[in-house]
Amino acid sequence: MDRLENLKNIIMYLMADNRVSHRIPSTLEERQRMMRALMNVWEPRPISEDFLKMQDAELQMQCEDKGVVEISDITPQTSDILLWQGDITRLKVDAIVNAANAQALGCWAPLHNCIDNCIHSAAAIQLRKKCADKMQGRLLATGDAIITKGYNLPAKHVIHTVGPIIPDGIPTKEQEEQLAQCYRSCLDLAEQNGLESIAFCCISTGVFHFPNELAARIAIETVKSYPRHALKTIVFNVFLDKDRDIYQQLLGA
């Protein structure tokens, strides 16, 4: 398969579907960015099987380019609760957790670097379509979660949860409980679906402004106190050095 030609065909389909027209760039990286930007603004609707074959082939190659991280690659493994720093879309686990918005349809800002955008962009436009089918126009309440397939991600599933937004960076006790409920909702879905491993992102930190250390304490305490049965391995996935340091200290890693 000619990768550049395949990307051109993907872009042409998405432009026609979105009713927009742009100059198609010439390089691989530029075409990948354009593909992602068009995916980010794509409105959920029926999808051509021919398009899905082209899209999935490219996304699977992007997955291989980034490299897949197995649970066995994560060190040190001193318990069944692990810490890993990096891109959550590389993790091969039964489920990764997405910090979603209330629509639960992914981030609509082209090329935005939030985790919601990164996960949807790496998975497929089918992920937005499946979320739309599940939500049927309703909003996901803070603390609730839904589960979908992972499509082209190494993870088998994505669990989408909506964390509390803290504009002033000072959460109330109710918002602390809402964050804990996010973790419980994700664990509930994992157990109900017989999953053996799950990777949590730092829910509600970053653009939602929940204080990083308090968020980590709530995450760890909630996970440790949860009565697990099917779930054997929990991964706390961090991206920032600051969060890595906080989790290392709290976990004693």
Image (cartoon, rainbow, N blue to C red):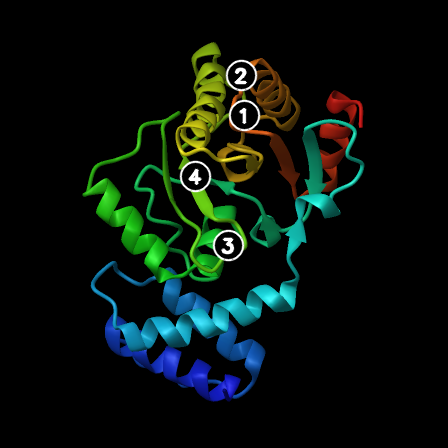
Q: Nearer the viewer, residue 92 or 127?
A: 92
Q: Nearer the viewer, mark 4 or mark 3?
A: 4
The reply to whether discs 3 and 1 touch (Cβ–Cβ < 8 Å) is no
As drawn, the label of residue 118 is: 3
Label located before the other in sequence (1 or 2)? 1
Q: Please indicate whether residue 220 sits to the left or right of residue 52 in the image.
A: right
Label located before the other in sequence (1 or 4)? 4
Label located before the other in sequence (3 or 1)? 3
Q: Position of residue 252 (x, y in %)?
A: 80, 23
Find the distance from the CA under tag 1 to the CA under tag 2.
27 Å
Residue of label 1: 169
Find the distance from the CA under tag 1 to the CA under tag 4.
25 Å
Q: Please indicate whether residue 144 sits to the left or right of residue 244 in the image.
A: left
The reply to whether discs 4 and 3 touch (Cβ–Cβ < 8 Å) is no
Q: Please indicate whether residue 192 sits to the left or right of residue 220 in the image.
A: left
Q: Position of residue 134 (x, y in %)?
A: 25, 43
Three-letter amino acid code of the residue under disc 4: Ile
